[in-house]
Image (cartoon, helix red, strand yellow):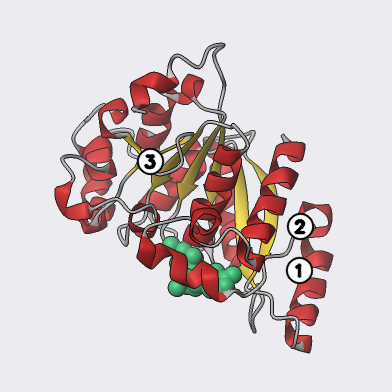
Amino acid sequence: MSYKDVKRGLPQRDAKVVAVINQKGGVGKSTTVINLSACLGEGKKKVLVIDFDPQGNSTSGYGVEKEELEHDIYDVILHDQPIEETILPTCEPNVFIVPATIQLATAEIELVSAMARESILKEAISRVKDDFDYVFIDCPPSLGLLTINALVAADSLLIPIQCEYYALEGVAKLLESMQMVKKRMNPSLEIFGVVMTMYDSRTTLSKQVVDEVQSYFGKKMFKTIIPRNVKLSEAPSHGLPVVMYARVSKGALAYSKLAKEVVLRG
Ligand SMILES: Nc1ncnc2c1ncn2[C@@H]1O[C@H](COP(=O)(O)OP(=O)(O)O)[C@@H](O)[C@H]1O
Ligand SMILES: [Mg+2]
């Protein structure tokens, strides 16, 4: 199915735009984007993934060959490429992706001199918002102009936090950026939820971190906790979300549960 077929899915939808964000690298942003979107797609939700990280991990995690791409998110942000023309199908029929390549790394600098540089992504998403139930933005691990674009474009934030030492490190800074954008450009921006990742039930550290984050974020924390699971780390090298790579795995189960919670939250 191509992107154009999505449009047949009347009535019109009004996507919830969620930025998956944490300026720390390696906390499970891309893993969450890939697997949560796949589970929502299985549950008949129409989902658009926007890879907004030059590393392009959600692009490769969905098996998209970067070398063969005609356009990617870089062209949308800097060369007025209509976003519709960059949307690709994935192995999950209800999930589509706007890919990213390393090209996007230069956008951070090139954006500095662009007009309305903070709201380019928002404008692009507004063109296709009616076609999806969810748009997930896979953010880069920094608080630069790309991330500001994501904060301006998003209705809400999904913050993955790794069950590790210094889990909350940098979170205050992230919330500061959120407040800044909220005040100036996106007053209704809110936190959609916080998801704990790479939980290791054998360690007391994991439990401590969950308690700490719980007391910081309260009800914003999702009840579903994503365990450390080898299938989750293997799946991207096969270009598949874990529900397709290893349906009967703790990782697949956890992301399916998370998807149900996400739907309940709206
Ligand atoms: N729950 C998990 N269990 C095992 N490995 C994981 C899990 N979540 C993420 N990983 C692995 O950890 C690394 C970092 O995750 P990733 O999602 O790429 O983080 P980020 O996008 O925040 O940089 C990747 O190699 C990924 O496969
Ligand atoms: Mg990533």
Q: Is 7 situated above or below 113? A: above
What residue sits 18% from the left and 35% below the top?
79
Identify the mark at residue 97; answer none if there is no mark: 3
Q: Residues within 10 Å of mark 2 (few under 14, many from 20)?
A: many
Identify the mark at residue 221; answer none if there is no mark: 2
Q: Is 172 situated above or below 85? A: below
- The quadrant in which residue 56 appears is bottom left
What residue sits 54% from the left and 14% below the top?
12
- Numbered marks: total: 3
Decide if residue 97 is on the left or right side of residue 82. right
The spot of residue 188 in percent (x, y) is 64, 33
The spot of residue 149 in percent (x, y) is 42, 43
**Which residue in the protein does label 1 denote?**
213
Q: Callout 3: helix, strand or loop?
A: strand
What residue sits 68% from the left and 60% below the top?
254
Q: Amino acid at mark 2?
A: Met
Decide if residue 222 is on the left or right side of residue 112. right
Image depth: mark 1 or mark 3 in front: 3
- The quadrant in which residue 87 appears is top left
Find out whether the residues at labels 2 and 1 contact each other: C-beta distance under 8 Å: yes
In-front residue for pair 81/238? 238
The spot of residue 46 in percent (x, y) is 53, 31
Find out whether the residues at labels 2 and 3 contact each other: C-beta distance under 8 Å: no
Sequence-first tag of 2 and 1? 1
In-front residue for pair 104/5? 5
Q: Is residue 149 visible?
A: no
Sequence-first tag of 1 and 3? 3
Q: Amino acid at mark 3?
A: Ile
